[in-house]
Amino acid sequence: MSADVLANPRLVVDVKTLKVVEHQDVDRKWYPASLTKLMTAYTVFRALRAGQVSLTTPVVMTKNAAAEPPSKMFYKPGQALTLDSALKILLVKSANDIAVAISETVGGSEEGFVARMNAEAQRLGMRNSRFVNPHGLPKLGQYTTARDLAILAVTLKREFPEYAGYFALEGFTTGKKIYPNYNLLIGRFDGADGMKTGFICASGFNQVSSATRNGRSVVSVVLGADSLGGRADESARLLQEGLTDPGTNAPQLMQLPPEGAEFADVADISKQICSKEAAKVRSEGRDEVGRQKLLSPYIHEMTREPNVVFAGLIPGTEKVAGKADGKQAMSQGDAGNIPVPLPRPVN
């Protein structure tokens, strides 16, 4: 069995003390998939704090953004939504067209925004991360590690508590359709309050999760799980451990020794994750109505409909599709008087 098959980077860290009570392969280079969108969100939050954009800034769909493959919203060039709605869709549905439209709005261009992402990553000490797009679709040269993702997640929670609600949303509605969160812990694990999931064949099923109980907040990272249910179960186990283990003698995140040259290459587990055999196993992990079976004793059934917030097009822009590549279809002033629904408060 290859090293890539055996690799399953993971860790859990206390947000306040930075104590790591469990870790494995934390410096193993991995494809982030849609966990990339955590860095996209962080870069946007920095721009918001700097006053470069606001939550009412219109995010206009361009031909470049609309051309991204799914997961996506299938908006047309020229259609627009507020940055607030775009962030909700980015973090709940993980829409790739929205990620690119946000990057063009905040960075002036997709390339300019990606440069910002990399500058922020280096400033935070994410030494083994590099981003080449704002959404995480497979592309050579994009990689991260469990350690770096933990640094990012902890920083998001510490530096931007005012935006924490975006990560805890159970779902959103466009007014026509409800989109539940891909994160199976939200509303099902006691204290779960974020953060993001991701999947491509090369990475397997990834998840960064956070939970808070009795004033204690922890973050877990799981990379390379074999299924939706597997990453949720493992994330729940790690969160439970982090919330209940005092970590008295545990090392701090930055004190974990760097791992060696055997982790120089980016892991690629496509053959194991996207084989016919693996697909069959995953299909057997669903119940008779197609729901993912969750085996963790720490995850309970959600017996109600998810609480959702609005996230959709700015009124009046639904019919402007196709105008001038979308770039001039909406000005920031046009959206200035549109009320912005706030993220659901974190319980």
Image (spheres, grey):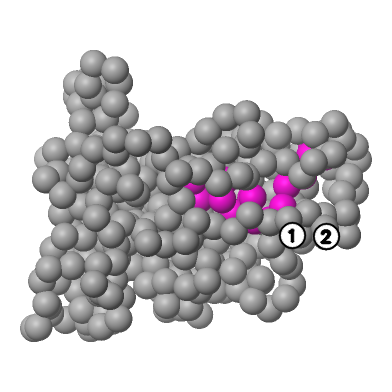
Q: Is residue 152 above or below residue 328?
A: below
In three-dimensional space, the C-alpha distance between marks 2 and 1, rounded to whole angstroms, equals: 6 Å
Residue 26: quadrant of the picture: bottom left
The kind of residue on which mark 2 rests is: Gly
**Where the N terminus falls, by quadrant?**
top left
Residue 54 in which image quadrant? bottom right
**Can residue 66 be seen?**
yes
- The picture places residue 172, in percent across and down from the top left corner, at 53, 42
Please provide percent x and percent y for residue 232: 25, 45
Residues at discs 2 and 1 in contact (Cβ within 8 Å): yes
Q: Mark 2 points at which residue?
A: 336
Residue 146: % across, % down? 30, 62
Q: What residue type is labelled 1?
A: Thr
Image spot of residue 60 (x, y percent): 77, 47
Q: In this view, does 261 lie to the left or right of 324?
A: left
Q: What residue span does the magenta drawing correspond to? A: 77-92
Left or right relative to 221: residue 42: right
